[in-house]
Image (spheres, rainbow, N blue to C red):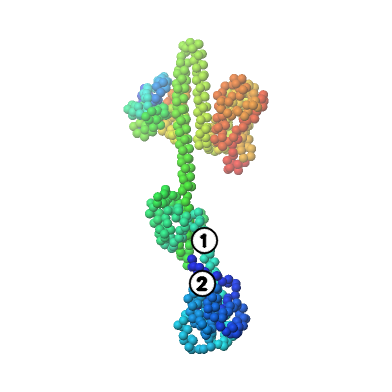
Amino acid sequence: MAAREPRPAPTVLVADDDPDLVALMARRLERAGYDLLTARDGAEAAQLAAEHIPDVAVLDVMMPKLTGIEVAQGLKADPSTNHIGVVLVSAGFHDAVAGEGAFVDADDFIRKPFGPKDLPAAVGAVLDRARRAA
Amino acid sequence: MAATQPSSPGRVQPEAQDPTQPPVVLVVDDNATKRLALTAILAPLGLRIVEADSGVAALRCVMAENFAVILLDVRMPGMDGFETAALMRQRRESELTPIIFITAYDSDDIATRDRYVGGAVDFMFAPVMPNELRAKVSVFANLYSRAELLASDARDVQTSADQLRLLTDAAPIGIFQTDAQNRFVYTNPRWTSITGIPAEAAGGQTWEALVALGGGACLATEPDGETDVADSRRFEIRPPGAPPRVVVVTSNLVPDGDGATAGWVGTLADVTAEAGAEAAMAHAHEAALAANVMQLNFAASASHELRTPTTSILGYVEEVLENDALAKDDRGFLEIVYRNARRLSQLIDDLLVVGQGEIGASLMHLELAPLEPLVERVLSTFVPKAQGAGIALLADHGTDAVSVLVDPPRFEQVLTNLVSNALGFTPSGGTVTITTRRRGAVVEVAVCDTGMGIEVADIAQVFGRFYRATNATEAAVKGTGLGLAIAKGMIEAQNGRIRVASTVGVGSTFTVSLPIPAHEALVA
């Protein structure tokens, strides 16, 4: 991965079909100092990710149009987006439904319900790993 | 010249001669003295002798029984010997019976007899020489005895063949025979009823040709476990005007005398019903898998639908609680909201786990894991809670580092529920001890507390869902009533068992037992 220009604040894309949760996650990430992009379904998330190339995408697993797992697969399969860190948000059971390795395209995941610090911590950890790898 | 009775089906047999009885000789002469003389000469041979005093009487005798040889006087009043012989030859049963003509004359008789009589004949001139007569009659009698034995054997073979045919005709399985080119030479009625092909149509055809004609196909060549000459194949055939059938054809090579193939004999079994049952079972298995997937999808959807709003409730309450300017009363109320939302969230988790547990063993990812570290990991998470409650939390291991076949996170959850329960029901100053022990073919993990114990009336129900012991409710111990139900369901899905022993006021012991994997048992 090529080293990127240092930027003032990393951009995080948050995608969930529940607007209350999008707002909650955005509020916590903004407070942690990130720039935010928000999407309401998987297709919008994929489109925004391709257009704006955020540093991290936080994707709810169960979303209309495209699931978080499908969006993650699409991002990791495309050379122009495969450096974007992916945090999946799961309410459980999706690993059982989708089978072994369903989350292999994710860099981290958190479970609902998550505490106030869980999401910023997960995003921070993914960014740290990306910086170290760069 | 042998008087063999040819055996062929449908032919009316004369009374069969018993091969153990002596052959019978017919002596024909109009002169009683001469008959007496002949009978006396033959007596040493031990044969039975029937006498006739005329050609007509002789014919009657021939119609009544079969003779090994006939001694026939040529010159008799009325019908002479040649005429009598000619008439005897017209009867099928006696056409081959040897006849010895006895005549006092010579060349004339011999010259004319061919006009009348064919077949085995001989001449003797009177007066006969006793030794010569005995020798001739003896030869014919022996021939006759041997022919009768052969005929008897032939009749036995025919009887066996007839019985075998009756059996194959009535057999509930198709039976066939083919020649060296694998063309049918015999098929039984059941073969016809299975294939819908009449025996006449099958004759001279190969099985492949007949199957292809109906649009059928060989489904599989089944492995043959019995002999190396039997060949077993499964076919789908389409009998005319009937639904397709699945049949199993098993053939056995029939070697000819030189070790080459004379043909095949075999059976044809209709296994359509069994094949249908197999298909139904496969279908049921698929349906069960589909139901499992449906249940998983339901669990995933339910989980998402329930956990998303609780995440919002908890999250926004947390946000508001971070506001330092919150009025004191408002903060108190919000903390109540938060605490109850947490309980609701915990209940949802437990409910989902119960649902998951019901999906059963198929969801478990069993792996060999050392038991004691699993137990220690669970215990370590409870150390702060135990200290806070003033309860001693102890471990006592005695399994020689055995490994067990479990789904580690779910096994840990079982232990977590048991230890959490034990701590919840034990007063300050009490003790919770976890003991691990080998007991024969199983390993046991016992969680023992010095708590309030369980009433006898409650013990049978502690593993039921939403069951809360009377004293637990009175003592205001928090819980959803699902912890033990979850523990039981999960441990059973990992091939384990759980039991409880308890004394009110003394404490309770919950014991989980798991089979020791075979190779682990050897380590002991």
What SS does tag 2 mark? loop
Quadrant where the C terminus of chain B sits is: top right
From the image, tell me which residue sits under label 2. B5
**Chain designation of label 2:** B
**Earlier along the polypeptide chain: callout 2 or callout 1?**
2
- Does residue B443 sit above or below B2 in this rendering? above
In the rendered view, does A81 fall on the left or right side of B332?
Answer: left
In the foreground, B524 or B287: B287
In the foreground, B185 or B511: B185
In the rendered view, does B241 fall on the left or right side of B506?
Answer: left
Closer to the observer: label 2 or label 1?
2
Q: Position of residue B211 (x, y in %)?
A: 40, 54
Q: Position of residue B388 (x, y in %)?
A: 59, 21
Q: Quadrant of residue B52?
A: bottom right
Q: Position of residue B31 (x, y in %)?
A: 57, 84
Please, what is the three-letter code of the amino acid marked with disc 1?
A: Leu
Residue B7 can be seen, yes or no: yes
Residue at 60% across, 77% down: B48
What SS does tag 1 mark? helix
Residue at 63% across, 35% down: B437
**Chain designation of label 1:** B
Distance of label 2 from label 1 (alpha carbons): 23 Å
Residue B220 can be seen, yes or no: no
- Does residue B355 sit above or below B336 in this rendering? below
Q: Residues within 10 Å of mark 1 (few under 14, many from 20)?
A: few
Q: Position of residue A25 (x, y in %)?
A: 42, 22
Q: Can you tell which mark lies on residue B164?
A: 1
Q: Residue furthest front?
A: B78
Please, what is the three-letter code of the amino acid marked with disc 2?
A: Gln
In the foreground, B185 or A94: B185
